[in-house]
Image (cartoon, helix red, strand yellow):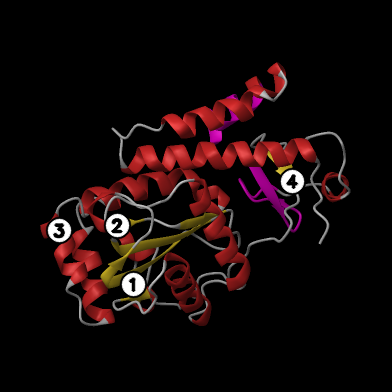
Amino acid sequence: MVRKEHHIVKHLIQLQDLLAARAQQQAAQPKKKLEQLDKNIKVLADELSPDLRSNFMRLVQKNVEALAPVTGENCSGCGFALTKALVNNIHGGSAELSRCPNCTRILYAPDVPLTRRSPRRRWGDPVKRGVERFSAPELMLHKLKGTTGEEVLWEICENMQSEGYVEDCDALHEAALHREAIISTAMGGGMAFPHVRGVEGGGLTLSIGVSKKGIDFGGSTKTKIFFYMVIPTAASAFYLKLLAGLTQSFSTAAEREPLLKAKSQEDLWNALIKGTRKMVR
């Protein structure tokens, strides 16, 4: 498929990816130094015209995600219904940047739209609280089989697709690998937070996988616990809060132990619910 957005939007997407990666690292590890990431951000930002750079950075401060893909005829950032003329202009590859009339994000047409299925809800289901709003027992993988980072990410993604939470595992997996190439999502304590932003059609979804032996995932130690998240554009700001809550919930070895010792899907689910009760509301 021919990419629709022009080179300026491509450049802005790259810059936003770096800024998002920085925000995610800071949310999980506030004291971590990110000199190389900051240098890369500066290089891309300096290549923009002064006016565009200033406007873009103001949008980032306001919305976290300064760009939003068009989903159908709506802005994926705020859900605002766009005019057909505006949508046609965006898909037609206009040389002018298009903005959402409501949230002011810069709109673009993605190469391959990342979508997911709407959450399955039944009348009379109990109200969900805490992390239960974003996950489910069937998304718990207590014994990952993969021996490499790529295999583990595929295994988790494939399970999400088989359980009906995402539609295109291949595209999602490619996006997850692209994110890891920017800077590893591996954190301290043998944890990693791989994720894909801009997956529209439902709410934020969290899946957890545990590797008993651990694998090399770009961190200082082997990674054993993978918190894999699929994030719609509208939930990008909340995602950072959830990320901070998860890292705080499992910051010590004692807090991570129930996850690592889980012998079943149910055990892992119960450990997640109990472990996040105070920090994720």
Q: What's the distance in space between the residues labelled 4 and 2, CA to CA?
A: 33 Å
Q: Is residue 99 visible?
A: no
> What amino acid type should be assigned to the residue bearing mark 2?
Met
x, y percent for residue 238: 43, 46
139 or 6: nearer the eye? Answer: 6
122 or 62: nearer the eye? Answer: 62
Please tell me which of labels 3 and 4 falls first in the chain: 4
Count residues near mark 3 (Cα–Cα under 10 Å), then give few for <14, some for 14-19, many for 20+.
some
x, y percent for residue 41: 55, 30
Residue to which mark 3 is pinned = 255
Count residues near mark 2 (Cα–Cα under 10 Å), then give few for <14, some for 14-19, many for 20+.
many
x, y percent for residue 232: 55, 55
Residue to which mark 1 is pinned = 126
Disc 1, SS: loop
128 or 23: nearer the eye? Answer: 23
Tally the marks: 4
Q: What's the distance in space between the residues labelled 3 and 4, CA to CA?
A: 42 Å
Q: Nearer the viewer, mark 3 or mark 4?
A: 3
Residue 22 is inside the magenta segment: no
Residue to which mark 2 is pinned = 191
x, y percent for residue 187: 31, 50
Q: What's the distance in space between the residues labelled 3 and 1, CA to CA?
A: 27 Å
> What amino acid type should be assigned to the residue bearing mark 1?
Pro
Give the magenta range: 55-80
Q: Nearer the viewer, mark 3 or mark 1?
A: 3
Please tell me which of labels 1 and 2 falls first in the chain: 1
Please tell me which of labels 4 and 1 falls first in the chain: 4
